[in-house]
Amino acid sequence: MRATSAKKFITSGLRKQTPAAKFSSKLYPSAAAALEGLEDGMTICAGGFGLCGIPETLIDGIVKKGTKDITAASNNAGVDDFGLGKLLATKQIKRMKSSYVGENAEFERQYISGELEVELIPQGTLAEKLRAG
């Protein structure tokens, strides 16, 4: 009897599994296709750490698409002409939520002149905010 109740406990927390065919693919044929729903004023989250593992192709796609008034959440603001720095250079980012912003002269210029809103968030808090949605 004890084994039965243990089995109930283990399986009671599992969600009903949906067949894989019902999930949409996360693979796209191009950056343009992946960014199809991106509109002015939206919030984007850029992964990676520092300049490693960042979505370079998607950032280039956003630059090309011309989407503006973006709120960007990332652990850093890129550097001049690389990473999110490309979006700052074209003034497509309106607000930056980040834990580190120290290596981007264009970021500094826009912030000091009042062109860019900035929310500095400790790294762990930023990760938890992103996890929580």
Image (spheres, rainbow, N blue to C red):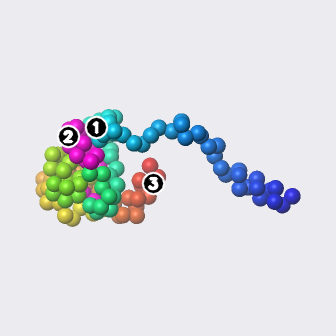
Q: What distance separates the C-alpha of mark 1 from that of mark 2? A: 9 Å
Give residue 36's quadrant in the image.
top left
Q: CA distance from mark 1 to mark 3?
A: 26 Å
Element type where label 1 sits in the image:
helix
The answer to whether the residues at label 1 and label 2 have Cβ atoms under 8 Å apart is yes
Q: Residue at x 30, y 51 (%)?
A: 55
Considering only vertical position in the picture, is 49 above or below 46?
Answer: below
Residue at the spot x=22%, y=46% of the render? 60
Tags 2 and 3 touching, CB below 8 Å:
no
Q: Which residues are magenta?
A: 57-77
Q: Which residue is mark 3?
A: 131
- Whether residue 31 sits left or right of residue 23 in the image: it is left
Decide: few, some or many residues near mark 2? Use Cα within 10 Å; few <14, some 14-19, many ≥20: few
Percent x, y for residue 4?
Answer: 82, 56
- Amino acid carrying label 3: it is Arg
Say whether residue 28 is left or right of residue 104.
right
- State the quadrant of the N terminus: bottom right
Give the label, 1 or 3, closer to the camera.
1
On the rendered structure, is 1 left or right of 40? right
The image position of residue 49, as x and y in percent, is 32, 62
Name the residue tied to disc 2: 64
Q: Is residue 63 magenta?
A: yes
